[in-house]
Amino acid sequence: METTVAPAGIDIPEPPTVGALFAGFLHLGLIGFGGVLPMARRMIVEKQRWLTPAEFTDLLGLCQFLPGGNIINLSVAIGLHFRGLAGAVASLVGLIAAPSAIVIMLGVIYDRFKDDPRVEHLFAGLAAAAAGLLVAMAIKIALPLRRKPVGIVIAALCFIAIAVLRLPLLPTMVVLASLSMLATWKFQK
Amino acid sequence: MTATLLALAAIFAELSLLAFGGGNTILPEMQRQVVEIQHWMSARDFSAMYALAQAAPGPNMMVVTLIGWRVAGWSGVLVTTLAKFGPSSILTGVVLHFWKRFKDRPWRRIAQQGLVPMTVGLVAASAALIAHASDHEWTLAVITALVALASFATKIHPLWLLAAGALGGLSGIGLP
């Protein structure tokens, strides 16, 4: 990792180079198991000091607002901020390169051994556990809605449309998101 | 082959722009497209792919890469990766440009808050669909329930819970 020695008394870190962005996000991609966000904050704010805590929170707010993974968007935004298009590409490719290779490797293993009953059982258990993590996550993010009846209705309608009726996402989203935003706007007045 | 790649590109580019609230919100639509419409794999295989991706490090949408690879090999990986990460990234870049201007506008907060119940409903739908496809034996349903409980009530690292689930499966209890 490059460290630039700033002249004494001046505490403005040098903007990261394209190579440093790639290396930083490559590292992040490798260490982030089950949620990269806490690791990302540590690397970007505390270790590399690319952003101040306030800048990080601000940028993360934008990235959460937009479609796509938070961390994916964050890598693009940080890359773009410091080094333009080349920086954005370097950060994004750095972030997904190692996980892509690993996930494909796991896929090869799964395909080769899935007919072996023991491996089949192992993967079945793994899949059941992954489902459990998702169930817990759904409960955690649903809890803040418990005092918001309108929110509960929208969430329930969305669940029924998508999981039970298997309606396509795009029209479901257009209708329910508009309703939800309208309700948010009405009720805050 | 070209038709398959085009279908992959179209499906994942659309999902890329609809993934408000992160990757888990688009799992149901991804499953609907990949399993029910295109018949590229069974629902059980889809859940297995999702589980594999969760066991790997990195952002949580690596299942996309795996689907691309499974459906069309290396060109599939390239196409799905570009389609899934390209459009949302370009949008991020464009919006970043204007961000400072409307950061404090009230409509931004309304839009953001309005999307929250959608995210909740979609993640719950993801959980239901993945659990439904994964838990084809009672033992597996027990594993799902125990992992959900442990993940909800404790701070145990998800990777340990995945490992415990895999071991539970390996024990073969109640499995054919």
Image: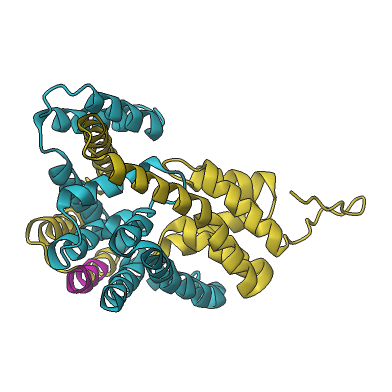
Chain colours: A yellow, B cyan
From the viewer's perspective, tell me whether residue A5 is left or right of residue B160. Answer: right
> Which residue is found at the position 57% from the left and 68% from the top?
A89
Q: Does the rendering let one see residue B169?
A: yes
Of the pair A110 and A80, the residue shown nearer to us: A110
Of the pair B41 and B47, the residue shown nearer to us: B41
Q: Is residue A180 above or below residue A143?
A: below
Q: Is residue A180 magenta?
A: yes
Q: Quadrant of residue A56?
A: bottom right
From the viewer's perspective, tell me whether residue A107 is left or right of residue A10. Answer: left
Residue ranking furthest to the right: A8
Q: Quadrant of residue A76?
A: bottom right
Q: Does the rendering let one see residue A40?
A: no
Where's the C terminus of chain A, which quadrant? bottom left
Estimate the x, y position of residue B37 in percent, counting from the top left: 14, 67
Main secondary structure along the magenta-highlighted residues? helix
Of the pair A144 and B140, the residue shown nearer to us: B140
> Which residue is found at the position 23% from the left and 56% from the top?
B122
> Which residue is found at the position 17% from the left and 41% from the top?
B134
Q: Is residue B62 above or below residue B38?
A: above
From the viewer's perspective, tell me whether residue A168 is left or right of residue A31. Answer: left
What's drawn in magenta, residue-wise? Answer: A169-181
Estimate the x, y position of residue B60 in percent, counting from the top left: 39, 50
Q: Is residue B173 magenta?
A: no
Estimate the x, y position of residue B157 in percent, counting from the top left: 41, 31
Q: Is residue A11 above or below residue A176?
A: above
Estimate the x, y position of residue B9 in percent, counting from the top left: 33, 74
From the viewer's perspective, tell me whether residue A54 is left or right of residue B63. Answer: right
